[in-house]
Amino acid sequence: MTAPRPKGKVAFLFLGETLLIPHLYPIVEALAATSDVPIELWVSTSVHETLLTRWTAPFPTVRIRRAPGFRVVADDGSGRNPVLPAKMPMLLRLLPYLRSASIVVCAEQTSLWLPRLFPMRAKFVKTSHGVGSMSARDDPRRRAAALTLVPSELERQTYLDRGFAPERFVATGYVKADFTHRTHAAPPFADTRPVVLYTPHWQQHRSSWWRWGAEVVRRIVADGRYNLIFAPHQRLVERAPEVADLMREIGDLPHVHCDIDGFAMVDGSYTGVADVYLGDTSSQVIEFLMRPRPCVFLNAGGAVWEGDLNYAMWVCGEVVGDVADVVAAVDRSALRHAEYAAVQAEFAERSLGAVEGGAARAAGEIVRVLEGTPVR
């Protein structure tokens, strides 16, 4: 039995990279399952359209609409990240269509240019994509959102410390944890060797890739005792095209699985099936730690990291300062995990908040805004 229909219509913006979808779509499902409110999903490409059409079939209140400038791209139905239309022209052309919505929900900051620059009846709700100490919390566009949904009270407090209004930030729990359309439920390998997931960050000042990345990959591959999932952030290849060359070099080996644009690299598949996390400052480690397991962090830049909140996740595993020690550190990680398990569990809980029910709480907040109910 559904609740009475709140007045208004809710528009969700699926205009960006596919990595945003698992952070946003669970809210669509939760809202459609608990309310009769009309829902429109605005999509930028045929890849987004194919995925969302498949998943929303059970929900009669959901309508998928093509944003102005919609792009039809080569699509095998698996959700590979497409080349996107230019975002700002699309948003500007979409503006008249959003005037009929009461709520607009987005998972990225670019869409917040609309309420920042134009008077709009619709209230914008921003939900987080990812979590961690390096989020760009000071971006002025954030102040244009009527409500921002964050995973944890810890994350919420970081905004309150910057002077944001408390009633405009609500901790819901980690919405992506409720995403149910993962590509892989088991490791994508034929054998049972331990699986190492290497996920270098895409921004150079935060990443291990430019100094160590190729050597790290080659050392693990040559060692031969591990299955390697090499799945960097989708945007890394834009800045480091040599990533694609390395993937072609090693991608056919039976103990290597490379992914640069597949949906599995953003839907929680790899963080779910890996045995060891190997990385630098990507927020994916926090997702990995929803189930504590061994972690190894690469201090390729020689950062003085202890006590630096930008590297807060590095308390969750051994930090390696010499690339020659990487394989040995991976070897030690299982034996040393007992040293870090409790720290990992506490860190994940503080960072992610609840890992069940986040989407339902987010949907409830949207209904509250529709009904004009004050924040609790």
Image: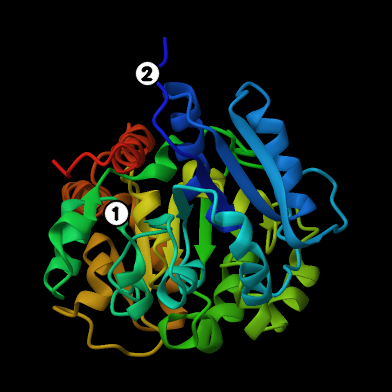
Q: Is residue 109 above or below residue 224?
A: below
Q: Which mark identifies residue 44?
A: none
Q: Is residue 260 left or right of residue 7?
A: right
Tag 1: amino acid: Val
Q: Quadrant of residue 136?
A: bottom left
Whole-percent x and y of residue 208? 47, 80
Closer to the camera in the image, 207 or 249 = 207
Q: Dot 1 lies on which element?
A: strand
Q: Residue at 16% of width from left, 47% of height from top?
A: 342
Secondary element under disc 2, as helix, strand or loop, is loop
In the figure, is residue 335 to the left or right of 274? left
The colour scheme used here is: rainbow
Amino acid type, callout 2: Ala
Residue 3, numbered label: 2
Spot occupied by residue 316 in the image (x, y as percentages of width and height): 25, 60
Marks 1 and 2, how far apart in space?
Answer: 25 Å
Location of residue 16 with respect to 236 vertically, above or below:
above
Q: Give the residue pinned by disc 1.
A: 150
